[in-house]
Image (cartoon, grey):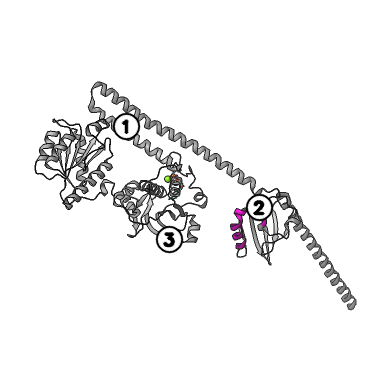
Amino acid sequence: MLPIIETSGQVFAERKLRELNETLEQQVITRTAELDRAWQLSQELLAVASPKGVIEAVNPMWTAVLGWERHELVGQPFMDFTHPDDLEPTLDAFASIFERPLVTPYENRYRHKDGSYRWFGWTGTFENGKVYASGRHITVEREQAEVLRQSQKMEAVGQLTGGLAHDFNNLLAGISGSLEMMQTRIQQGRFNDVERYMTVAQGASKRAAALTHRLLAFSRRQTLDPKPTDVTRLAMGMQEMIQRTVGPGIPVEVVGATTTWPALVDPPQLENALLNLCINARDAMPDGGSITIETANKWMDERAARQHDIPEGQYLSLSVTDTGTGMPPEVIARVFEPFFTTKPIGEGTGLGLSMIYGFAQQSEGQVRIYSEVGQGTTVCIYLPRHYGMVEDETVAERIADLPRSKDGETVLIVDDEPSVRMLITDIVEDLGCAAIEAGDSATGLKVLRSDVRIDLLVTDVGLPGGMNGRQMADAARVVRPDLKVLFITGYAENAVLGAGKLPLGMAVLTKPFAMDQMAARIRSMIEGAKEQARRA
Ligand code: ADP
Ligand code: MG
């Protein structure tokens, strides 16, 4: 009995094995069919490619989305279908698959048979010597996002123009209101009040000018006045003002090598840009932090120049680093867009960085942003190096920067208007010179005929006291033949002066003059007087 049982057992086992084989085969067939169905039905473009990027297999979706038949694709390098602008990054993305699977979709464009392009988001992996890739068609999504972006931009433009109109109306109200009040007061003979309204009107005009300036900067149509500039000195000169602006919770440090190159740039615009960057930094640090302003010499070799999209050469960099919130990549990608802001309405204009970008481009430089969320941000402005020295004139134009006189130079100021005398006296004293004031030509002449040291006479032309300014100066030159004279005149008085053919050592400044201008003029005339004395 046993053998039989044994035999039947063997038969049973063989049958089992055969059945198992059959099901396995069946399973493989089913599995392949399933895979094949997935391959056939997938909504995504599926492809198998060689490590060299030659397409070996594609699913039907390729034909549905891109119009190419299977045989037109297989055997071709996928690069032949890639948008030329996407080629380089696409090759990089392809190369990265050999190191690790591509899981975050990489977006690029492929050419449709009709010549147009479609957008795809690709994922892929490298296994058993083949690259397996899957691409989701995202053209519609991208177009919708673009439409949304455009409409958001238009909304922002609307907000901005609305805001600007509002600002301008306020400023105009300040100006026209003051003018009206001045007219009334003049009619009433109350001249003392006029000054006050004038100040209000002037303040409003200045702010209006600043506003248009910002708009022009942003449209890159501002007139730039580039000068050889010591950017480190400029930054140091602004430190105190920036510190006051950002408040005590955020220490501001200026780091600069003493040997930075001069840059060719418009100084007031650069100051404006620097201030803007620091305000952005402050806004990114609501809980405090610190700001570092740094200048450095940068030599851009061919590679660096290509990376920074500027010509090869030497640059001066000015960077502002904060320890604030930082920015995610999608924000960084848009910060130079005009009107792009993440700040609440009324707080951000979205013009700061776009303006800085425009300014840097117009200055033949560049701006770059390095930022990490939670770590902080560095914004770096590159400016072309100026080959040569910084001329003193350019940096010394601000009164505060003017060199102080050490030799007891004295300026005589003759004007019947006390406030003008006071202003000029202040300028003269700021320059470190002594000032003597006279309110009429008779007093002025008395001083001039004395043996008091006078290096420069600054005088109004229309004067009480029997002589006009010109006559007084001529009389003074009888005893002081080398006396330097600076006339301040309104347009009407130019005839009296005989302006245009003034003798050597006499000059005119027309009213109204800017204080800086007056200071520079006085200084240069005193320098001239000293030079003359030295030669004599
Ligand atoms: P605004 O300051 O009016 O928003 P900007 O053009 O100056 O306009 O800046 C645009 C946006 O860039 C800001 O809203 C902010 O989101 C981002 N940003 C700029 N600077 C910084 C910074 N230092 N740290 C973090 N985000 C910044
Ligand atoms: Mg800003």
- Note whether residue 452 is visible: yes
Type of residue at label 1? Ala
Which x, y percent locates residue 310?
47, 55
Dividing the picture into quadrants, the one containing residue 434 is: top left
Q: Is residue 28 above or below residue 532?
A: below
Q: Measured along the vertical axis of the image, is residue 149 above or below residue 34?
A: above
**Residue 470, relative to residue 280: is it above or below?**
above
Q: Position of residue 16 (x, y in %)?
A: 84, 69
Q: Which residue is mark 3?
A: 299
- Kind of element beneath mark 3: strand
The residue shown at (10%, 37%) is 446
Q: Amino acid at mark 3?
A: Trp
User: Which numbered mark, 2 or 3, is in the foreground of this view?
Assistant: 3
Q: Secondary structure at mark 1?
A: helix
Q: Marks 2 and 3: CB-CB under 8 Å?
A: no
Q: Which residue is mark 1?
A: 201
Query: Of callouts 2 and 3, which one flags the residue occurring earlier in the amino acid sequence?
Result: 2
Name the foreground residue: 109 vs 455: 455
Residue 206 is covered by the magenta coloring: no
- At label 3, counting other C-alpha atoms closer than 10 Å, the crowd grade (few under 14, some 14-19, many 20 or more) is some
- Which residues make up the magenta segment? 80-97
Q: Is residue 182 above or below residue 513?
A: above
Query: Which residue, given by chain and number where applicable, does mark 2 sit on?
Result: 110
